[in-house]
Amino acid sequence: MDAMTDEIATLRGRYAGGAAYLDGEFMPLAEAKIPVTHWGYRRSDVTYDVVGVRDGRFFRLDDHINRFRNSMTALHMEPPEGDAEIRDILMKLVLMADVRDAYVSMECLRASPAPGALRHPASCRSYLSCSAVPWISVVSPEMEVRGMHLMIPKVKRIPPSSFDPRVKNFHWGDLTEGMFEAKEAGADFAVLTDEAGNVTEGPGFNVFCIVNGRVITPARGGLDGITRLSVFELCEELGLPLEIRDVTVEEFVNADEIFACTTAGGIMPATRIDGRILGNDVPGPISMQLKETFWQKRAEGWHGTEIL
Ligand code: PLP
């Protein structure tokens, strides 16, 4: 065995089912714990990213690491690990967890000020917490078949002027409240609007609507999702007209088709919104074309990075 193969053999399955890297050390996921005094916990002073692994291949790994780096920079965080090291850590975690389909998370959080230091975030070091666990999807098998049932809640998305939603974050107060409003209304998920009545995003996903064959997504107010970026590329490839602009709630709820998209679910067609039934209560044809092309291309290795 050469040195590389030797290392892989040692790593594989070491923490089967859930592996973590916390503050410089690898460990079983169950042992990964953060101090309750850290600002990552006390202030939700965290940024994160999630990359999917299907059939032993990361999807758009470098895009996720780049977005993670941009988020860390925006929050004035600088952990000791560089991008190449983060890439290596994520690879090792998937090998250690020994999963072919994985949900791989990278987080950077702020610790607490050292004793006697000024109680200011600039006095706190930041560190990484990463993990790999078996694949998690936000859509249930039932939702996959019947389509998602969505609703527009009363709660509004945090405005970009207060916190930039392109920085992936744990300030989920608005999204969590939206999930409770959705449950109350008998829907699966909420899609939040901004104060001006434009659609933004939902808890963990971006949204698109389709009107007269045009595929439309909000330009702002949400995360620049990597699955959303993949939809842009698919529209180009399939010759579907794409519009990235403000989308009013009226236009959205009256659209011909709606779909959501995220790492933890792919492209997810919706069949109901605020009780309105779209099409014949079955996922729409353009949404399905995008969904099927997405998974077919992923199976062929599109934007994939093999885990050896
Ligand atoms: N919007 C929010 C708030 C999210 O948390 C996520 C992903 O978790 C998304 C959108 C979708 O982004 P991506 O496609 O990069 O997973």
Image (tube, grey):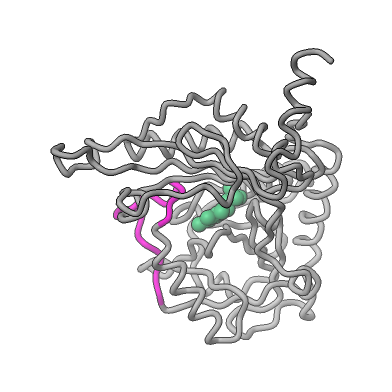
Residue 69 is inside the magenta segment? no
Q: Quadrant of the C terminus?
A: top right
What's the magenta bit mostly, secondary-structure-wise? loop
Q: Quadrant of the N terminus?
A: top right
| Left or right, 187 with reference to 281 | left
- Residue toward you, 258 or 120: 120
| Left or right, 42 with reference to 208 | left
Up the image or down, 75 lies above or below 244; here it is above
| Residue at 71 percent of width and 52 percent of height | 134
| Residue at 58 percent of width and 82 percent of height | 274
Residue 136, given in percent of the width and then of the height, sits at 68, 57
| Left or right, 120 with reference to 182 | left
- Residue toward you, 189 or 288: 189
State the count of labels: 0
| Residue at 73 percent of width and 22 percent of height | 7
| Left or right, 16 with reference to 151 | right
- Residue toward you, 26 or 256: 26
Residue 307, given in percent of the width and then of the height, sits at 76, 32
Residue that sits furthest to the top in the current view: 2
Up the image or down, 209 lies above or below 219; here it is below
- Residue toward you, 173 or 116: 116
Residue 166 is inside the magenta segment? yes
| Residue at 66 percent of width and 48 percent of height | 18
Residue 77, given in percent of the width and then of the height, sits at 35, 35
Q: Which residues are magenta?
A: 155-170
Residue 101, given in percent of the width and then of the height, sits at 76, 48
Up the image or down, 55 lies above or below 159; here it is above
